[in-house]
Image (spheres, rainbow, N blue to C red):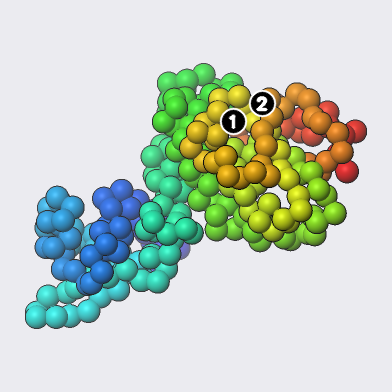
């Protein structure tokens, strides 16, 4: 097949993954603890049998599911990869990342043609909000804020330790995480450096949500600072770059914040 076919099918592959996650296929198979037929999965999830059989077959073709024949029918089970990354209960689950891309990121990409034509983001068409502020779009409701924070949480749970140990940060006993969001990277940091503490800087509503849903009082070496306009002295700044959004928007604001704290970081 030519390049055009590959590009086309890559899109369909993503939509197949999104549908399987949204319907709970991988969680259902994990909970069943044995291979299941399409009819059994459809009955358990309340879907059409033929539709589920087609979806499971597509997932097997993408190596998201394993198959075996038994009694004249095909039985499906999770692969090691789907068990680790696509089931919600796994500590390395990317389920919330997949969900966010399905519900939010792909929605924005529907307006790519308009974005190129107009030279600006399409938050107003996608979400009915002004295009000037990236985070007003991302945090357009408490529920959407939590979903974005779950996305960040799932991402850092997979690669956060590698990021935090790429350089030796042990000399720094106080570390500042600018745009710390859900606190997932801060957790990875204090695990990697038991003698250090981390202060998360973020918007007041993000800090409040983080405290309520993501960082517990038992995380004794993680602290919070509401806002990004002032920085305590004598620490090292960890910066979550945001390379998207409107011109002069989130990226520029983040850069300005770093410049303000140049005199207070080691």
Q: Are marks 2 and 1 in contact (CB under 8 Å)?
A: yes
For label 1, the SS is helix
Any part of residue 118 in sight? no
Residue 261: horizontal and vertical position, in percent?
83, 32
Residue 157: horizontal and vertical position, in percent?
55, 54
Q: Which residue is mark 2?
A: 226
- Residues 106 and 193: in front is 193
Q: Alpha-carbon distance for marks 2 and 1?
A: 6 Å
For label 2, the SS is strand
* Residue 161 numbered tag: none
Q: Is residue 38 left or right of residue 66?
A: left
At x 58%, y 52%, the residue is 156
The quarter of the rendered structure image containing the N terminus is bottom left
Q: Is residue 87 left or right of residue 202?
A: left
The quarter of the rendered structure image containing the C terminus is top right
Q: Which residue is mark 1?
A: 207
Q: Mark 2 or mark 1: name the one nearer the start of the chain.
A: 1
At x 83%, y 28%, the residue is 260
Task: Count how many numbered circles sit on residues in the image.
Answer: 2
- Residues 18 and 118: in front is 18
């Amino acid at each position: 097949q030519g390049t055009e076919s590959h590009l086309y099918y890559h899109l369909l592959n993503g939509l197949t993954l999104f549908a399987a996650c949204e319907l709970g296929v991988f969680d259902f198979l994990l909970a069943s603890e044995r291979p299941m037929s399409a009819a059994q999965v459809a009955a358990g999830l309340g879907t059409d049998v033929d539709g589920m059989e087609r979806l499971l077959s597509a997932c097997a073709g993408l190596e998201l599911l394993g198959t075996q024949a038994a009694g004249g029918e095909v039985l499906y089970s999770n692969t090691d990869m789907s068990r680790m990354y696509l089931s919600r209960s796994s500590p390395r689950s990317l389920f919330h990342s997949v969900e966010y891309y399905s519900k939010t990121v792909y929605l924005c990409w529907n307006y790519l043609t308009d974005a190129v034509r107009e030279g600006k983001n399409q938050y107003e068409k996608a979400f009915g909000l002004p295009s000037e502020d990236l985070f007003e779009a991302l945090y357009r409701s408490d529920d959407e804020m939590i979903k974005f924070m779950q996305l960040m949480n799932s991402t850092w749970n997979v690669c956060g330790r590698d990021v935090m140990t790429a350089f030796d940060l042990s000399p720094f006993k106080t570390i500042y995480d600018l745009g710390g969001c859900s606190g997932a990277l801060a957790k990875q940091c204090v695990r990697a450096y038991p003698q250090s503490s981390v202060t998360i800087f973020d918007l007041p509503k993000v800090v409040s949500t983080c405290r309520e849903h993501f960082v517990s009082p038992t995380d004794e070496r993680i602290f919070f600072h509401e806002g990004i306009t002032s920085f305590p002295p004598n620490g090292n700044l960890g910066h979550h770059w945001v390379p998207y959004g409107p011109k002069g928007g989130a990226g520029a604001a983040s850069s300005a914040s770093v410049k303000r704290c140049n005199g207070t970081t080691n």
